[in-house]
Image: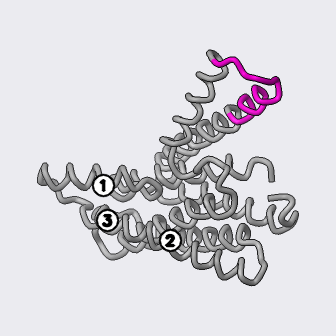
Amino acid sequence: MRYRGVLLAFVAGAVDTFSFLSLSGLFAAHVTGNIAILGATIVLGQPAGVWSKVLAVPFFAAGVWAASIGANVLQRRSQLAALPLLGAECVLLLLALGVAMALGPFGNADSPAALLLGAMLTVAMGVQAAAGLLVDPREPPTTVLTTTLTRLVVDLSALVTHRFPSVAERQHTRQAAIRLGEQCVAFLLGCAVSAGGHVLIGMGSLAIPVLAVVVLFIHSRWLGPSGS
């Protein structure tokens, strides 16, 4: 599927915004943000949601670890990892949606139910982040914008100021910049749609990224490896 990475960037933006708004500033897909907020929370003496930030890093790492092990097992069996990893993310997000709808909203982000929801979301985003590196490391990461935006600006500056040795190389850089720009826009759109959904339907807004992943999984399974 040509725009697999773009749709996953939308998912990451939507999940990140949902967790931020629903779980006292938790970034499910952004480890750096959690560390920054954790430090500020401790220093300023505002402990709301502190445990969700503390646990976000190991839970995210657990998702990456599990995806890596699963991919290695599949590779030893000469099987492709893209669809199973996407399926694992799909299951995690569906379970998270069930928890959110059944037990939310959460006044205390450190309550057991809220921590469970945060764990599912961060593990799911860890799986997505790892899948990007394991399936196609040439593609930009879909869970954060820092690296993607940096590469986009570097490519744009090269297109404006650099004299390319061939037309083909310039065209390649241009196409890469378009791809990076699409992912930046998709992530931002995911954030905006999720925020709007949160205002309108509250915890049910998690269904937005869940539906996107389900559609992507069904589409990838239907078309096979060539379609994903």
Q: Residue at x 75, y 84 (%)?
A: 77
Res. 6 visible in picture:
yes
Percent coordinates x, y for residue 8 in the rendering: 64, 53
- Residue type at numbered disc 2: Gly
CA gap between label 3 and label 1 equals 11 Å
Identify the residue under disc 3: 52
CA gap between label 2 and label 3 equals 16 Å
From the image, state whether disc 2 or disc 3 is nearer to you. Answer: 2
Can residue 166 be found in the magenta stretch?
yes
Res. 117 visible in picture:
no
Q: Nearer the viewer, residue 133 or 82?
A: 133
Q: Is residue 149 left or right of residue 75?
A: left
Q: Which residues are magenta?
A: 162-176
Marks 2 & 1, CB-CB < 8 Å contact: no
CA gap between label 2 and label 1 equals 18 Å
Give the mark nearer the N terminus: 2 vs 3.
3
Give the mark nearer the N terminus: 3 vs 1.
1
As helix, strand or loop, the secondary structure at mark 2 comes to helix
On residue 35, which mark appears? 1
Q: Is residue 50 left or right of residue 148?
A: left
Q: Report crowding for label 2: few under 14, some 14 to 19, many 20 or more residues within 10 A (C-alpha).
A: many
Identify the residue under disc 2: 63
